[in-house]
Each structure stands twice: as C-alpha cells, then as structure tokens.
Image (cartoon, rainbow, N blue to C red):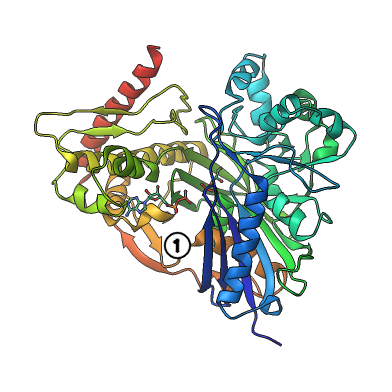
Amino acid sequence: MADQYILALDQGTTSSRAIVFDKKGSIVNVAQKEFKQHYPKAGWVEHDGNEIWSTQAGVAAEAITGAGLNGTNIAAIGITNQRETTLIWDRKTGKPVYHAIVWQDRRTSDYCDKLKKQDGLIEKVQQKTGLILDSYFSATKIKWILDNVEGVRERAEKGELAFGTMDTWIIWNFTRGEHHITDVTNASRTMIYNIHDLEWDQELLELFDIPESLLPDVKQSSEVYGETKTTIFASKVPIAGIAGDQQAALFGQRCIEKGMVKNTYGTGCFMIMNTGEKTIKSENNLLTTIGWQVDGKVTYALEGSIFIAGAVVQWLRDELGIIRKSADVEKLAASVDDNDGVYLVPAFAGLGAPHWDQHARGTMVGLTRGSNSGHIARAALEGIAYQVMDVLKAMEADSGIDIQELRVDGGATANNLLMQFQSDILQSPVIRPKTLETTALGAAYLAGLAVGYWKDHEEINDQWQVDRKFEAEMDRSHAEDLIAGWDRALKAAKAWSGER
Ligand SMILES: Nc1ncnc2c1ncn2[C@@H]1O[C@H](COP(=O)(O)OP(=O)(O)O)[C@@H](O)[C@H]1O
Ligand SMILES: O=P(O)(O)OC[C@H](O)CO
C-alpha cells in the first residue's frame, strides 16, 4: 500500500489552508490561500461561499501534489473551520443564495438588543445553548438572510435550501451534495442547538423563525462521514473528522483532561478549558460549549473570546506605521525597560469576554512628554496579556479550578517578550509547544483516530512536545501594581462607552 498521511483542511477567517501530516504528527506540506473580505457596510463582514470552496479545494490539491502524493496516500481528511459563519445554498444547484455572513458581522446586534429585553430570554438561551445572546452566533444571521434576501424564506419553507457553517459547506461540495452534515462543536455555536439534549432546539427554532428543513444532521467530531466524490483526489478519500477551529486546537494541544486550558493568540484570542463530561454554567460571561464528541462521549468546555489581540500589532503596523512587519514589535517593545505608566486597551471592536461591552473603544492612558513608540509597542503587547489574564481569572472563578499552566499557540506566540510578560502577569508557566499548527493537527487527530491511522489517545499524546516553557520572573507585588494600572485603564475604556 502507498505511504499513508492525514490531510487537515483549516478553513479560517482570512485564508483556507491544507496541511499534510505524517504518523508522527509532523508537517509534511502546507498550502494556503487568502480570500477576499467583503465589507458592504460598517459592521458587516461577508465571504463569497464559492471562493471559500474554490480556495479550499485548491489548497487541498496543492498540499498533496506539492508533497509528491495523490489521493491514494491520504488515509483520511479532517476538517476544521472558522465557526458561526453562516451560508445558505440551493440543494439542487449548490448555489449560495447570499454571501456567507461572517462571525465578526454585527448587522443583527440591534435585533439581539431587542431580544435581550424579553423576560427571561437571556437566561433561556444560556441554559439551552451555553451562549450569550449575541449577533456573534449563527441564529440571527440565518434569520437575517431568510428575512432580507428575496424569495429565500419561501424556498426555505419548501425545503429547497440548506444552511451550513463552513465545515458543512465544504463537505457538501466534496461529496457533491450527498452529505449535509456538521459536528456537535459547530452546532454548539449556532444558538439553536441544545448542548444538553444534543438536538436542534424546537423552541429556539420557533423564536428565530428558522425552518428545521434547512439544518444539517449533527454528527460526532470523529467518525467516517462519507467519501470525497470530486475529481480532486482521483480516488475516494474518507472524511473522518470535523471540529470548529478553537475546539480542534484544544484537541491538538492534547488538553484532553478536565481543567486543561489552551489559549490561541491570533487576530483575536480564544481561551478554552476542558471541563469534562459536565457543563459549567458561567457566572462571568464565558461561553459553555462543546469541546468534542468522540466514541459517543461528549466533552464540554468553557470559552472566553477576546476580539483584538494580534490585530493590535497590525494596527501599530498599518495605521500608526511604527513597525514594518508584525515581528518587529518585539524589538521595539524591548527598546524600553517598562511601560513607564502607559496602558493601551485595544477595545477597537468593543470588549469581548469577560466584559462584553460592545460600546467600549480603544483607549491609551498614562502618556507623558517622555512616552515614545517603544512604550506604545510595549503597552500594546501588554494589553494582550492583561486581556488574557482577565479571561483566565473568570475561568478560574467559574470552574473552581486553579489553572496551573497555560498551553499557547497562534501567530503572536512567536513573540517571546509577550509570552514572558504573560507568564509574569499570570504568575504561572506559559508553555509553547513545538508544533504551533495545533488547529490543523487537532482535525488530523480526530480524522486519524476514526480510521485507525492512530491507535488511541496515548499514541498521539506522546507527540505533543514543549518548545519553550516561560516561567514567571517578576515578583508578585510588582505584577499586582501593574495589574492595578490595567484595571484603571479598563475603567477609562468603559467610562468612555458609558458617556455616549
Ligand atoms: N511576532 C509577533 N508578535 C506579535 N504579534 C504577532 C507576531 N507575529 C504575528 N503576530 C500577529 O498574529 C496574528 C496572526 O496570527 P494567526 O495565528 O495567523 O492569526 P489568524 O488565524 O487569526 O489569522 C496577526 O494579528 C499578527 O499581527
Ligand atoms: O478563523 P479564526 O482562527 O480567526 O477563528 C475564528 C473563530 O472560530 C470564530 O469564533
């Protein structure tokens, strides 16, 4: 038999990626293609469904052929994706009826504000779905398309249309419409899925006026769902893993025991804790969500989403022009000994967890005549670390678990100064693994386990290796003084929003 590999497809917010992994969990080849972001109005963000599919199919083929392989070398495909992003298409023609509405899109936030005023609805939504009633999730995006695109509601009611997040859309295309499916992790981000009963919730479907005929079947995160039918691989390849990208990263980081936590530092930050077989209801504005379902067993998780993290570095680069490329921020921040009292709260798109203040705005405080670009760069990086600390504290409070160490991944973890400061401010170790492609690796593991490419968890646990462990070097009282300054800066950002 030809040598066997696993192909992971990572359909992200800004690019489609494909990574070929070998049995040791090492990367054999990567292909990546960015696609266009559409901003038709302020606060709106859309993707072209056709472009999502063409880039994803393109990189899948490129990753395989670039490694000198073909479909017969691929034991299984695992799919991971930007979550919540919503697409509706025609079941017969496979044509989208509208662009995909992206998770960042805020067009339904006024509608959500109105819903929040309904007696007991916030609690009901949280109880059933684990989520905060917010336009971030798919439900109100589906409703918007049904209500605003001509003829769509009638066609949906006749059963002619299909809804899906990007995993569903990709599998629909790979199987030429044979499979209309998603997995529990993606379903748990729609705000119409009951995470306890593991079913689409009739009451919420009624509330959002969504016909059930639109919805995909919900599967486990690791099982053989079907085979590819496209000509891309020249042979049929089993599709055997699906998970939302943040959950896939938790799996890829091998956070498989209760209480283990990972944080991804990308454009935003997403921290997730494995909470085991039970759900934890958050009292601190975190989300309760599904980590994965493997071998019939559901593992739950708590999640805190931060909207702006690495994006503040892009802002220093693109808007302030004080660095040329993202990586330069470390050197600039290291050009000063400390923040000299300067704090930057990057609430450019409001504040996510644990504050959920959509009106807060970016705030810089503590400037003096001596403040320079080094202080601003340092304040920007430190602002990422303080936000992570706030989510981590909320997670400890909700779970009653003392978080001993933080496993990290994502583009901004390349920054040693940020990682060291994170450890200093948390007063606990921050651990960066050798493989930073943990999202794709998680999807690969889910698929590989389903087809027996990897025998069991033990076999893959051994593959996780530390690149560097950052230990706290700052003394606790100094960290506490700095945190007190951050709390004041946060108050300023919130006060600005309160005085509208
Ligand atoms: N050395 C660095 N220091 C700080 N931030 C960085 C560094 N390198 C990249 N970034 C930031 O990381 C983000 C990209 O990370 P990535 O994991 O690819 O994000 P995403 O998956 O959200 O697109 C960008 O916002 C970029 O500014
Ligand atoms: O595509 P990413 O990595 O920005 O992740 C997006 C998240 O899944 C949104 O919830």
The N terminus: image quadrant:
bottom right
Horizontally, is 445 left or right of 401 in the view?
Answer: right
Q: Position of residue 328 (x, y in %)?
A: 26, 53
Callout 1: few (<14), some (14-19), or many (20+) C-alpha neighbours within 10 Å? many
The relative height of residue 73 versus residue 324 in the rendered view (above or below) is below
Q: Secondary structure at mark 1?
A: loop
Q: Quadrant of residue 486?
A: top left
Q: Quadrant of residue 317?
A: top left
Q: Identity of the amino acid at label 1?
A: Leu
The C terminus: image quadrant:
top left
Residue at horizontal 56 percent and vertical 33 percent from the top:
105
Residue at horizontal 37 percent and vertical 21 percent from the top:
494
Residue holding disc 1: 436
Residue at horizontal 74 percent and vertical 62 percent from the top:
223
Please say whether residue 256 is visible from this viewpoint.
Answer: no
Q: Residue furthest right?
A: 158
Q: Position of residue 280 (x, y in %)?
A: 59, 39
The relative height of residue 2 versus residue 87 in the rendered view (above or below) is below
Horizontally, is 218 left or right of 271 in the view?
Answer: right
Q: Residue furthest top?
A: 499
Q: Residue furthest left?
A: 370
Q: Position of residue 407 (x, y in %)?
A: 43, 56
Residue at horizontal 73 percent and vertical 38 percent from the top:
193
